[in-house]
Amino acid sequence: MELWRLGPIACLALAASCSMESVDPLSAVGNGEGLLLLDAEAGWRDSRRIVCVQVEGSRGSCSSDTAAVVVDDYRHSAQVSAQWRKNDPNTIEVLVFGGEIARCSSPSSGARVILRQLPMAQRPSREGWDDITTRMFDGVRDSCASPV
């Protein structure tokens, strides 16, 4: 979903999330049950990728301080994939290729995060990325289930 479809208040809440940090939204996708998955690039000096979960229509902010997932040593957009799990609207799957997981925590919304960290060499090409590709990594340890 394009951010402009969320309306000006949601876009402003996401963009103005923290005065000490620049936040560049990449996507915002609803789960069809009132939750919104926000995927963004953040930071001034060091780039990081953040994933937030909010109740749709809330005025909450998405920043490194409020994100469920924070990935440091982030270099390009294909390095992180965040999406709602197919047929499970309360679970978010996050795949991180390279980078350093700085934080993974359960969002206050009650959604569940499954986080898998993989080497850059295993990252599929953009053309080869689909739901079946995501399932290839189901056997990889969930880094969010363990303390990070």
Image: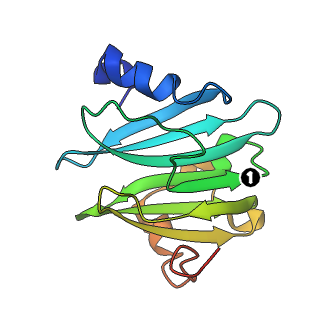
Write the residue at 61% across / 52% down: 80
Depth check, front residue: 128 or 57: 57
Q: Which residue is mark 1?
A: 72
Q: Quadrant of residue 69?
A: bottom right
Q: Quadrant of the C terminus?
A: bottom right
Q: Position of residue 99 (x, y in %)?
A: 75, 58
Identify the coloring.
rainbow
* Helix, strand or loop at mark 1: strand
Where is 141 relative to 57, above or below? below
Judge by depth and name the residue closer to the eye, 90 or 131: 90
| Side of 81 where 20 appears, left or right | right
Packing grade of label 1 (10 A; few <14, some 14-19, many >=20) is some
Q: Quadrant of the N terminus?
A: top left
Question: How many numbered marks, from 0 up?
Answer: 1
Q: Is residue 14 left or right of residue 127?
A: left
- Specify the quadrant of the image occupied by residue 47: top right
Can residue 128 be seen by looking at this rendering? no
Farthest top residue in view: 8
Q: Considering only vertical position in the picture, is 130 above or below 145?
A: above
Residue 82 visible in this rendered orientation of the protein? yes
Vertical placement of residue 71 versus 137, above or below: above
**Residue at position x 35%, y 57% in the image:** 108
Residue type, mark 1 in image = Asp
Q: Residue furthest right?
A: 45
